[in-house]
Amino acid sequence: MNHSLMIPVVGIIVVLIFFFIIWSYLGLWFQALVSGVNISLLEIIFMRFRKVPPKLIVEAMITGKKAGIELETPLLEAHFLSGGNVIRVVQALVAAQKADIDLSFSKCSAIDLAGRNVLEAVQMSVNPKVIETPLVAAVAKDGIQVKALSRVTVRANIERLVGGAGEETILARVGEGIVTTIGSAETHKRVLENPDMISRTVLDKGLDSGTAFEILSIDIADVDVGKNIGAELETDRASADKKIAQAKAEKRRAMAKAEEQEMIARVQEMRAKVVEAEAQVPLAMAEAFRSGNLGVMDYYKMKNVEADTQMRSSIAGESTGEDDAQGTEDITGE
């Protein structure tokens, strides 16, 4: 291609690109102009250099203008650069104005930057949300388990959205209140007859304190009777006591058995010593005969004494047996 023709072609392309870019900015400026938004063309162009999407800012300003809310361009750009959701903030401001809720742009942007869905919070302020708690089980004083299911109607508190606790805290506090109410009831029948006592007790505790919500009502959806926990505990306790008593008895039996075995061992040891001693008697007598310390007459005298002792013992044993028999006859009458 001829160099003389290339230069005009390149120039035309550059001019077309320039006019295309200008036309896109010009279109946004014209859209803002006809919508009543006061923003200059240079501001729209400079937004691109500040890495802010001009279309997003212009559309947000137009939305606010149509709702009667005057928004400043620097505030919208600052919120976008801070990582906020500009469209959601503007929609929340519009919804708050329609619901006659006092909500400024600074507060709304702070709620959005805190990670809260500010639009949903405003909608919840107008249309309360119902949170269903999980099934909560508690035991009354009579030992019967009661299971309760409740529904909590909450409304968002705009003033406490930043730094306020969420739904999980509400559910935990309501569950704690249900357990406290059932546990303080004298009988489970009282809870079944008056389930609204749970609602009254929980509401009186001010469970929404420090949270981002305001509790409007707590309704008991279902109440059921569970297990007899008291009876189960008594049964388990009795079983444990029985096992402990059995263990102690077994310990005493083992100790008695050990003492008996020890006594038998001692008796056997004593008998062994007696037998050993008796075995030494003939040897001692033989030694006495050899040494002349014991004569034949002495030996016969000793044998006579032994015989006489055995005879007396025998007579005494027979007499004791007859007396025992006579005593038994007297007792039985035979």
Image: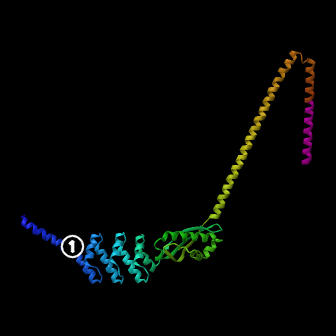
Q: In which quadrant of the rendered image does the N terminus lie?
A: bottom left
Q: Position of residue 47 (x, y in %)?
A: 28, 72
Q: Residue at x 47, y 76 (%)?
A: 159
Q: Is residue 153 left or right of residue 115?
A: right
Q: Which residue is mark 1?
A: 21
Dominant secondary structure of the residues highlighted in magenta in the image? helix
Q: Position of residue 187 (x, y in %)?
A: 65, 71
Q: Residue at x 36, y 77 (%)?
A: 90
Res 119 visible: no
Circle 1: element type? helix
Q: Nearer the viewer, residue 197 or 63?
A: 63
Q: What residue range appears in magenta?
A: 311-334
Res 252 visible: yes
Report which quarter residue 314 is drawn in: top right
Query: What amino acid is labelled 1 in the image?
Result: Ile
Q: Nearer the viewer, residue 115 or 174?
A: 115
| Up/down of 3 relative to 219, above or below | above
Colour scheme in use: rainbow
Report which quarter residue 228 is drawn in: bottom right
Q: Is residue 191 left or right of residue 82?
A: right
For disc 1, the neighbor class at 10 Å (few under 14, some 14 to 19, many from 20) is few
Q: Is residue 316 left or right of residue 94?
A: right
Residue 327 magenta-highlighted? yes
Report which quarter residue 83 is drawn in: bottom left
Q: Position of residue 204 (x, y in %)?
A: 58, 76
Q: Residue at x 93, y 33 (%)?
A: 315
Q: Residue at x 46, y 77 (%)?
A: 158
Residue 17 magenta-highlighted? no
